[in-house]
Amino acid sequence: MPIFAYVAVSDTTNKSTKGTISANNESDAIEALKKQKLRPVSVTPKDKKTTSISLFKSNKIKSDDLVIFTRQLSAMVGAGVPLLRSLNSLEQHTESQGLKTVLVDVIAEIQSGASFGDALAKHPRSFNEIYVNMVRAGEAAGILDDILKRLALQQEKSAAIRKKVKSAMTYPIILLVITVVAFFGLMIFVIPQIGNILKDLGGEDAELPLITQIMLGISSFIISWWFILIPVFVLGVMGIMRYIRTPSGRKIYHRLILKIPGISPIIKKVVVARFARTFSALTGAGVTIIESMTITAHGMGNVLYEQALLDAVDKVKNGEQLSHVIDQDDLFPAIVAQMLSVGEETGQTETVLVKVAEFYDDEVDAAINGMSSIIEPVMIVLMGSMVGLIAISVMGPISSLAQNIKS
């Protein structure tokens, strides 16, 4: 759909404003501006050359940009600014090229008669199912500004957890990469030279310690077959990553990470916190329990938890209480079922689940800090052990040869 740049005067504030609007033609653009209580001064087609620059920019919307957009839209709608004017203003002032592109399409859909939620649903990569359904619930109940505040808070919490996990894993990953690079560097460049020195000193028939022979054998194998090892390694990693994206691969991967000591408790706490916050936000927005459970299941981020919630939906439909169903599943801690039971009895399920989410957020923080304090020395010991092993394999035969020379 063509994009038009406009300059208009607001009927309410009598101030001049400028921006862009999507329409089939110039007449439709003028009519759309009038519906927004704007008096068009000029409406001109936007130069295609200026938009072609976006081809070289990423259209991905960052989580921080989405949080800011949601916060700003909530404030504007809450202040009584019409939705279309709010979206046009945010589209004009955002620095995110991806968000700008999506907003242009969303504005065009709304101008064509679609609801805000339906317009967002056409961009699932930018606005997930939870976001769209909460917006729809807010529109139906007339509390869109309040729902947007809830969404912004939920996104901020989720983004904070992701950043903490990434921050905790950055240092160990760097150490692991350094360790692997150092190992191959020593095996390819250092060990062969040391092997030649040992043979020069002791002769071809010199008997070397077993560990030295193993190191020399590994080094020789890597040097001789590197042109096969590297492609096999790269293709193997790519194959594993591709398999993980399949339904069966994701299930195996998610089951595996829930069994890894140290990692499993953190994953479970993150998923439970996500469940509590998402479910409370949806029920608080007026979404039915069954629909809230279904939407929350698809946003859990773990196939096993997703299936557990979808199975729970069928039991709740048959009349069982959610707290009782959750209590029967080993994936959820007992405290979740207990708090849900209290919420069901008092009619404050939303408030109780918010408390559960806050509790597990604190637990995730403590677990991540504890994991970081353990992983760092473990990686240092691993690097030291590798270097020490190579040193022993080198110094042992050199010491033996020195004693033979003395005698």
Image (cartoon, rainbow, N blue to C red):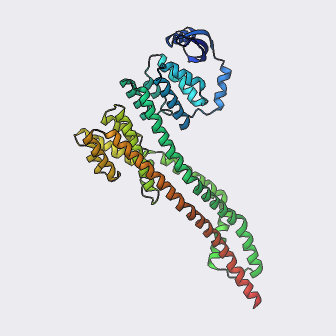
Q: Quadrant of residue 257?
A: bottom left
Identify the residue at the far left of this view: 319
Left or right side of 169 for 392: right
| Residue 256 appears in view | no
Q: Nearer the viewer, residue 157 or 235?
A: 157
Left or right side of 375 for 254: left
Which percent across, then down, holds residue 350?
Answer: 34, 39
| Residue 63 appears in view | yes
Q: Specify the quadrant that holds the C terminus.
A: bottom right
Q: Nearer the viewer, residue 344 or 375?
A: 344
Task: Please report the residue visible at 59 percent of the width from the left and 28 percent of the height from the top.
Answer: 94
Which percent across, then down, holds residue 121?
Answer: 45, 28
Q: Specify the quadrant that holds the N terminus.
A: top right
Task: Please report the residue visible at 22 percent of the width from the left and 40 percent of the height from the top.
Answer: 319
Which percent across, then down, holds residue 290?
Answer: 30, 36
Q: Nearer the viewer, residue 390 or 248?
A: 390
Q: Which of 184 and 5 is in front in this view?
A: 5
Identify the residue at the far bottom of this view: 407
Q: In which quarter of the image is residue 62?
A: top right
Q: In which quarter of the image is residue 298?
A: top left
132 lies above or below 36: below
Task: Please report the residue visible at 57 percent of the width from the left and 61 percent of the height from the top.
Answer: 376
